[in-house]
Amino acid sequence: YERCGDTDNNCYKWALEGGCENSSDSIEIYCPLSCGSCEPHSCSAQEANEDFCTMDLELRDEENGGMHCTFWHNLPGRGPINVSFLSEVETHVGVIKLQGAFSMHTYEDHVFRFRDAGGEILATLRMVKSRIVLNLDDDFIASLTNCVDRPQEHWDKTCDIWAKEEQCVRNPGFMTVFCAKTCHTCHLREEDLRCARRYLPMSQKPVLQRGDMDQMFQDIKDRAQKYSSNVQILSRSPWIVAFEGIILEEEIAELLAAQGQENFRRSKDQGDPDSFGLMKAIVSSNRTSQSAWCQDTCKELPSYIAVTDRIAKIIQVPTDHFESMQFLKYNVGDYYVKHHDMNEEKDNDRACGPRIYTFFLYLSDVEEGGETYFNQLNISVKPRKGLGLLWPSVLSENPTVRDDRTMHEAKAVLRGLKVAANVWVHLFSYEIPNLWACTGGLYR
Ligand SMILES: O=C(O)CCC(=O)C(=O)O
Ligand SMILES: [Fe+2]
């Protein structure tokens, strides 16, 4: 992870709004990365106040299931610092000298306290594999004691069994939300902590700076020519581009064959989140299609990898910024009313940031109806098997602001079956926040 990080997921947005230049507020202290005031190997003022960045850790897995931790500290205070476990009995494990390095064996959920020679607590940290450690206050540690698992009625397995199947590591977000006690991740139940971008092991950098999107579209024809038989720019403000033959017949066949009919469910909308960041998926009359997410083995299919890599090259965004492909089926009469793919309020707050592009794939011809219609632009796109359609959800001048001009709807299918797929692309990396249940997708 990068030591100098923003303390709020919204920093990038505030910075684009000119917050860093406005010296009357403290955004530069809270957002050193977005404000460009990170110094190499130093802490932000905010971090220094929290005694936070004063620890540089290197975690290494050991064969016996433990970890080896080396850290270089820079804690304030004088004289040697005692390191102790915080457990039933505080076990003294060592003394480190100021500016020195200290190395020891540890386990996933160990909590440590660092005290100066006078016994004053300088920092309290917890080890989490693949996560950095957090500075915890006493109230917070106390709250960990009433942490319970929340097994769901419809499950056919218990938290215990899932943990034995290594789900705490393979699926840490889901498991933290439902099986925090078993997984020893009680301190990560709160979405604010679990989903803070700077605590997640991901790049802190957005894929678009001001104006980059226009640059990308300027030469998109050149880049896409080798993948598409005909690249057509339907609109320049906002940009809407169509790519004929962007997905091949055999790729469509392979992707759809991997979706059992049982995968397709009535498409849902997101309801309100609870305090752990879980959404209820709600059936809505806004959309009547069936949808299925490409998951697990679907994402390993050669055609999935080929198609997403192709899209990544064309739009110059790495595939870890992509949501999993979402397949759609519209029978006669099915539609999706006028909407926007970005939700401005919630999206900038999330670690993955807002959706910046939709790369839409038409996987079938449709005899009649089923057009994608951009209401404000009066642009209508007729489904054609293999066609791709790209449009932005945000403005080139400020990729945190929704571009309302790309409101769109799916017209009702009048004759035939419409099969299609969404590839939604985010401003920040999507995969890691999704793994940690930070994208609101848990119930989808
Ligand atoms: O089916 C279409 O043409 C558009 C679908 C869509 O807008 C969506 O799924 O967000
Ligand atoms: Fe949409």
Image (tube, grey):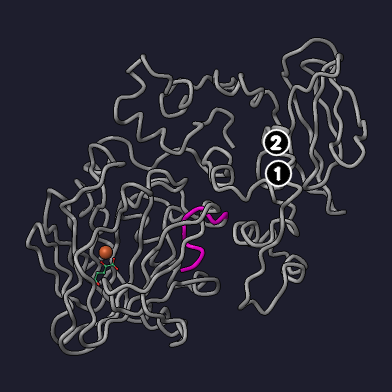
Residue that protrudes farthest toward the left in the picture: 378
Please tell me in which quadrant of the rendered image residue 23 appears.
top left
Of 73 and 227, the residue lying toward us: 73
Q: Is residue 91 left or right of residue 160?
A: right
Q: Position of residue 412 (x, y in %)?
A: 18, 79
Main SS of residues in magenta: loop
Q: CA distance from mark 1 to mark 2?
A: 6 Å
Of 82 and 308, the residue lying toward us: 82
Q: Residues within 10 Å of mark 1 (few under 14, many from 20)?
A: few
Q: Is disc 2 placed on a helix, strand or loop? A: helix
Of the residues shown, which amino acid type is indicated by label 1? Ser
Residue on which the image places disc 2 = 139
Q: Residue at x 47, y 86 (%)?
A: 262
Q: Are marks 1 and 2 in contact (CB under 8 Å)?
A: yes
Please tell me in which quadrant of the rendered image residue 205 appears.
top left
Q: Is mark 1 within 8 Å of ligand 1?
A: no
Q: Position of residue 96 (x, y in %)?
A: 85, 21
Tell me where the magenta segment starts and ends, as one range.
436-444
Indicate whether 299 appears above or below 263.
Answer: above
- Residue 438 is covered by the magenta coloring: yes
Q: State the mark number for residue 143.
A: 1
Q: Residues within 10 Å of mark 2 (few under 14, many from 20)?
A: few
Q: Residue at x 33, y 76 (%)?
A: 328
Image quadrant of ligand 2 equals bottom left
Q: Residue at x 41, y 24 (%)?
A: 35
Of 60 and 441, the residue lying toward us: 441
Q: Position of residue 33 (x, y in %)?
A: 46, 28
